Amino acid sequence: MSAIALHSASSPTRAEHWHFDYPQAKIRDSVTITLPVAVETKEDELDIPPNGGLKAWLQVLGSWMLFFNTWGILNTFGVYQTYYESGVLFKTTSSNIAWIGSIQALAMLATGAFAGPLYDRGYFRWLLIVGSLGVVLGHMLLSLVATYWEAILTQGFLVGIGGGCLYVPAVAILPTYFTSNVGLALGIAASGSSTGGIIYPIMFYKLIDKVGFAWSVRILGFTALATLIIPFAVMKVRAKPAKARSAIDWTAFSDGKFMTAVAGVMMGFTSCYVTVFYTSYFGTASGIVDTSLAFYLVPILNAGSMFGRTLPNWLSDTIGPLNVIMPSAMIVGALLFCNTAVVSAGGIVTTTLLLGFFEGVFLALPPAVFVTLIEDKSKIGTRIGMGLALAGLGVFPAGLGGGALLGSHVDQHFRNLWIFGGAFAICAGAIFTALRVWKGGFGLFVKV
């Protein structure tokens, strides 16, 4: 994945400004590492980052906790989809239920795009306060819901907006503490999202039969509260930003290559979130696995994603992100088509694990793809934020279109759902193939 390096835009004798750029270090986790913040300060305001030491690594710990409670929580939605489908809490269609997760995802991405400039203006602590309040209060209020619309407001909007406020500081603060080790630091921190996507679903499943839905969600909220205290205790901004970046770069809309990449990522998000939302429910509704294994399919998906977001990033630094994301999208499409033929527990576990790996590749690399297409490096933070916010619209077809295809019958038409998701992945791969040729030509060994 792309990297964030701290380097000087300076004269030979004295550094006047520092900028965050993206040429070398590896970021090893998801789409979640997406909103770098351009920081410009004078030399007397920001000394050389320590690039290690106790204080610096405590920032990594704090960032890990932020990822754990943002994208980790979002990656848990599949178990909620399965529970809501049972009709115990409220009765509605699969498509309506998917609105909850879709709104949560888009709220995170959209809020994150505007949280970047707030971080630049020095509102780091306020972002932590508002974000933590949104995530924790959202869970507490979710435990009290009795209707569908209450779940939309609490889990969709409140938790989503809170998450958007938190993950920007998680990314932005680390490059002020690290130089050559910034990729390692960001990779470790971002692994919290996959870990959260493993731990939270297991907690929910283990608790639901013992204490019921309300207290299960409250315990998850208390877990978020306890782990979010750590960032408050250990994270500290080293330099007050001197210049805030803009939230929107209007010239991006006339950049053909950039907007083509956004279209590809948007379609890829649709296919990926079809898997996130419906894999667990597929297991139970189809009768392939029992309820206990169905709930574990979400942690299995996230476990595969953890490796997919790590190992191929090294390869992308060698051969280029487009050369990695292009075949990964095609493989995701093929695996979703294979899901139409799954009839055994072994089959669904295998495809889920493989989908997690290759979707992890796809979710990790969009920022790196965007960076390769941005000529004016001062616009990197703004363009990445815009690109991911726009691409986040792809979550809606995943939830709403997927739910509509399933319908309300017992057989649940999963064949149509997997073809739908696979087609979007293949289209994403085709777009990235065209973009790769557009940018790098037909040479097989061109780094793009």
Image: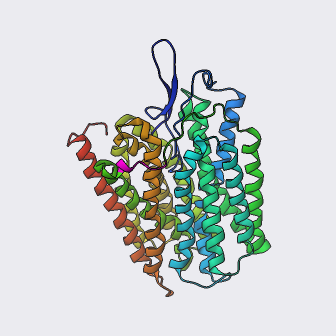
Quadrant the C terminus occupies: top left
Q: What is the residue that sits farthest to the bottom in this orientation? A: 409
Residue 315 can be seen in this image: no
Q: Is residue 294 magenta?
A: no
Pinpoint residue 230: horizontal percent, then vertical percent. 75, 45
Read off the magenta span.
247-252
Q: What is the residue that sits farthest to the top in this orientation? A: 13
| Residue 330 as seen in the image, left or right of residue 128 | left
- Most foreground residue, 446 or 35: 35
Q: What is the residue that sits farthest to the left in this orientation? A: 442
* Residue at x 64% of width, y 40% of height: 122
Q: Is residue 282 above or below residue 34?
A: below
| Residue 98 as seen in the image, left or right of residue 158 | left
Q: Is residue 251 above or below residue 318?
A: below
* Residue at x 38% of width, y 71% of height: 420
Quadrant the N terminus occupies: top left
Residue 113 can be seen in this image: yes
Tag count: 0
- Most foreground residue, 173 or 406: 173
Pinpoint residue 256: horizontal percent, then vertical percent. 28, 50
- Most foreground residue, 427 or 251: 251
Q: Is residue 249 magenta?
A: yes
- Most foreground residue, 343 or 150: 150
Pinpoint residue 426: horizontal percent, then vertical percent. 32, 61
Q: Which colour assignment does the render follow?
A: rainbow
Pinpoint residue 417: horizontal percent, then vertical percent. 42, 74
